Image: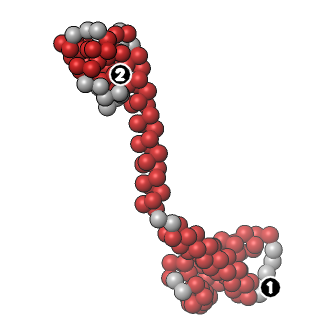
């Protein structure tokens, strides 16, 4: 019996309710959502209460639903507006920079560990060449070895480091 009265109310007031909600919300999609929510709330209310004036109650519910929906839409608009005020490319760029820094640190750790595994003389020659920038002849003089041996140590260091690190780079 109650379902029939809701159905009758929908038939008699449905078009008026849609116009009211469209005018109030300014958007047919929001009006349709609000109408559906209005009828759902009406069904819940009617199961617990006898209504003397269901039409008045229907529009009272619709006004509350429309106000809530309009408030939510304003909040969403302000939220998305504040997000567009942020330069999302800057956020993405900063995240990419952080990620690149983390990757670079890991690569550096891997290279450092690889250099640490070199034989002591080979490591010493490589560090003098790569980090102190000494020419091969100066390294040979400093360590009392031939320039050819310096070249062999550097080649070995580069090759070993490359082989240990190639999968990561």
Return the mark for residue 127: 2
Residue 101 coordinates in the image, percent (x, y): 44, 41
Residue topped by disc 1: 52
For residue 159, what is the image quadrant? top left
Q: Residue at position x 80%, y 70% from top?
A: 48
Residue 130 coordinates in the image, percent (x, y): 32, 26
Towards the viewer: 47 or 28: 28
Is label 2 or label 1 in front? 2
Q: Is residue 162 above or below residue 39?
A: above
Q: Secondary structure at mark 2?
A: helix
* Quadrant including the C terminus: top left
Q: Residue at position x 37%, y 25% from top?
A: 111
Q: Is residue 20 above or below residue 37?
A: below
For residue 162, what is the image quadrant? top left
Towards the viewer: 67 or 83: 83
Instruction: Please count the marks in the image.
Output: 2
Q: Are marks 2 and 1 in contact (CB under 8 Å)?
A: no
- Seen in the image, is 41 located left or right of residue 83? right
- Seen in the image, is 140 located left or right of residue 64? left
Q: Distance between the Cα atoms at labels 2 and 1?
A: 93 Å
Q: Secondary structure at mark 1?
A: loop
Q: Residue at position x 55%, y 78% from top?
A: 30
- N-term-proximal mark, 2 vs 1: 1
* Quadrant including the N terminus: bottom right
- Label 2 Cα neighbours within 10 Å, binned few <14 / some 14-19 / many ≥20: some
């Amino acid at each position: 019996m109650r379902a029939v009265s809701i159905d009758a109310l929908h038939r008699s007031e449905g078009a008026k309710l849609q116009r009211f909600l469209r005018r109030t919300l300014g958007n047919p999609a929001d009006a349709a959502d609000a109408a559906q929510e209005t009828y759902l709330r009406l069904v819940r209310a009617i199961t617990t209460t006898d209504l003397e004036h269901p039409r008045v109650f229907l529009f009272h519910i619709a006004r509350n639903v429309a106000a809530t929906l309009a408030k939510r839409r304003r909040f969403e608009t302000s939220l998305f507006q504040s997000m567009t005020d942020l330069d999302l490319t800057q956020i993405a760029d900063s995240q990419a920079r952080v990620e690149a820094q983390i990757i670079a640190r890991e690569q550096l750790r891997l290279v450092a560990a690889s250099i640490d595994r070199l034989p002591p003389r080979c490591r010493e020659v490589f560090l003098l060449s790569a980090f102190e920038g000494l020419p091969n002849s100066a390294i040979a003089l400093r360590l009392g070895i031939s320039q050819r041996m310096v070249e062999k140590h550097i080649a070995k260091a580069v090759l070993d480091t490359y082989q240990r690190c190639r999968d990561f780079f």
